[in-house]
Every structure is written in structure tokens, then in C-alpha cells.
Amino acid sequence: VISSSRLCTQTNNCAWPMARQAARSAASAALLLAGCEAYICDPSEYYASMDLQAGALALHAALQTRISSPHNVIPYTASDQTDTWDALSILDRDPSNPAQVIPIYTQRPMTASNLAGQTTGWNREHTWPKSYGVGTSGPDTSDLHMLRASDWNVNSARSNLHFDQCDAGCTSPAHAEADPTTAKNSVAFRPPAVVRGDLARAMFYMAVRYAGAQTSTNDLRLTSCPCAESFAMGNLSTLLRWHAEDPVDDAERERSGRVCTAYQGNRNPFVDHPELVARLWNAAMPDPVCASGCGGGGGRAAATRGSAG
């Protein structure tokens, strides 16, 4: 028996996708609803079988198992079922106007129906860039804990730059349409101050969720010496700083919860338990990517998974 706290149909999380599904296919809409009902998404229940006080190795393994199954993979693009366009229109919508979304790097509302295809629209941003290991057909491609609505032009300006503070030699804002607190240079991109912690926790999630065990996925890692060749994203030291300076707020908790209840069936543990970050990553841990250089033997080693590697 599934308790009422575990049914996403108790909320309006599925209402919009379900309505759109009705126009597409009543059968696929029924399947989406069935999937929603199966998810255990209440934070008090989601981690109930885990020992969150376990050592780093055991904790990393347990978290990876928990957030990997269940993980209902949402199609990146589909005409006959809920896809990432549909999901982001809900997950990133303007709280004061459901007909708008708030792009991640501008933090200014944009009409939700104004999709990509023109430079005045919004598109889907892989906050962990594809060039750093996110594939084109695996579950990582459409993972909604990492994927965000983004202004078309600013997304293009960010390109595949890794995240960093960008204190010197940078253009700020990163684009004329970007939030004033953004910045970029030829290698790094600084996102808006209000979402830096959110993005850091999305990076922590991706580094634990994906170890290359599933078809069409790679072993994603975090490092203070970002290296696309090694699928090593960063800058880890900066991400840890942002995690501390921009703590989890209600909006971030709501988004993570809705990803679980309405779409994927999994949560971001670093949103629910921010204290776990220091258990898996800290400045005292060795960083083989920095030690060996980009593409070196240490580039695929343990430090980018934290002490759990």
C-alpha cells in the first residue's frame, strides 16, 4: 500500500503535463500517472533504508544506488509523451506567472511558449556540458536535476565553459542579456549569485549519479582543474565555496521534490542533506586531475568523486 504522502497525484505536480498528454495521447498520459504514483518522494521516506552516517566509501555507493533506481528517464524531445520541454516549463516557471519561465542565467521571466528556434526564445541548458561527458542518448542527457531553462543567447555565450568565480580578466555581465552578477572569460563562467549554490549541488548530484555504469553514460567527476578530456567538471573548490555561501532555500527544495514526484522518481540528496557534501568532497582531499594534468593517468582517478572513489 502506498501512503498518501507518496502519491504525486496528491499535488498539482502532474497536472500540467497530464493535461498536455491528453491532447497528445490518453494512453501515454495514463502511463505517466501510473509512474508518478509509484515514486517514494517524501524526504523522510526516501532515505529511510540508508545509513547517512556511513563512511565516505559506503555513503557514496549507497547514494549512487538510491538516486539511480528508480530513475524514470524523461525523453529529451518527444511529440507523443512528456519531454524535457514540458518538464522545464513547469520546473523553471515564474512563481508569479505560470505562463513564464525564469532562465537560469538571466533570472528574468520569459514567455514559456517562446521556445528555441529563434534568438528571442529559451532553450535547454546542460549545466554539466556535453563536452564534459554528458551524452546524447543516456539518462544523463535529460536529467532534470541538471537540465535548466536558459535564454538562447546567454546559453550560447556560456557554451561549454566550466563554472568558476572568474575574478580576473573577465567580462561582466557574461552577456548583455545575462544577470549583472554573471561573468566569463575564455575558460570559465560565473552564474548569477542567487543560483550558484543550486548549480553547485546539481554538479555534486551528477558526479555521484553517473559513473559510466549505464549504457551511453560516462564516469563524471569533479576537480579543481577542469578537464573535458577526462569528463572532469569544476571548479570543485569554487563549487564548494558556492555551496556554503548560497545555502538551500525553499525554491530549490521544491524543484528537487517536483523532479521526483512528477518526473524522475529520484531526489538530489545534496539538496535534502547539504551536510553530505563535506563528507564526500573537501579541500584536504587529493585531486589526481590537478596532480597529473588534463588527460593524465590521474584524470580518471578517485578524487573527483570525493573520498568515495
Image (spheres, grey):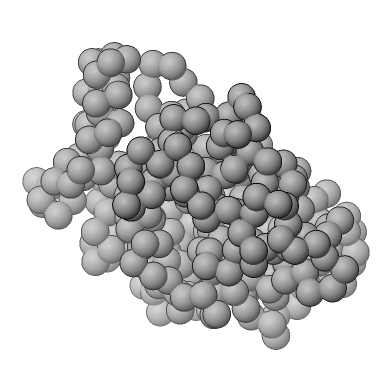
Residue positioned most to the bottom: 284
Q: Position of residue 233 (x, y in %)?
A: 71, 58
Residue 275 drawn above or below residue 225: below
- Is 57 or 35 nearer to us in this picture? 35
- Is 74 or 24 nearer to us in this picture? 24
- Is 68 or 169 nearer to us in this picture? 169
Residue 300 drawn above or below residue 288: above
27 on left or right of 273: left
Instruction: Name which residue lies at 38% across and 56% down.
Output: 256
Q: Position of residue 61 (x, y in %)?
A: 50, 62
Q: What quarter of the picture does the C terminus occupy?
A: bottom right
Is residue 179 visible to the viewer in this orientation of the structure?
Answer: yes
233 on left or right of 213: right
Residue 212 drawn above or below residue 282: above
Instruction: Name which residue lies at 64% across and 63% down.
Output: 180
Tell how many labels.
0
Is residue 301 visible to the viewer in this orientation of the structure?
Answer: no
Instruction: Name which residue lies at 60% across and 54% down.
Output: 105
Task: Tell me which corner region of the image, top left, top right, bottom left or bottom right, holds residue 47.
Answer: bottom left
Task: Tell me which corner region of the image, top left, top right, bottom left or bottom right, holds residue 119.
Answer: top right
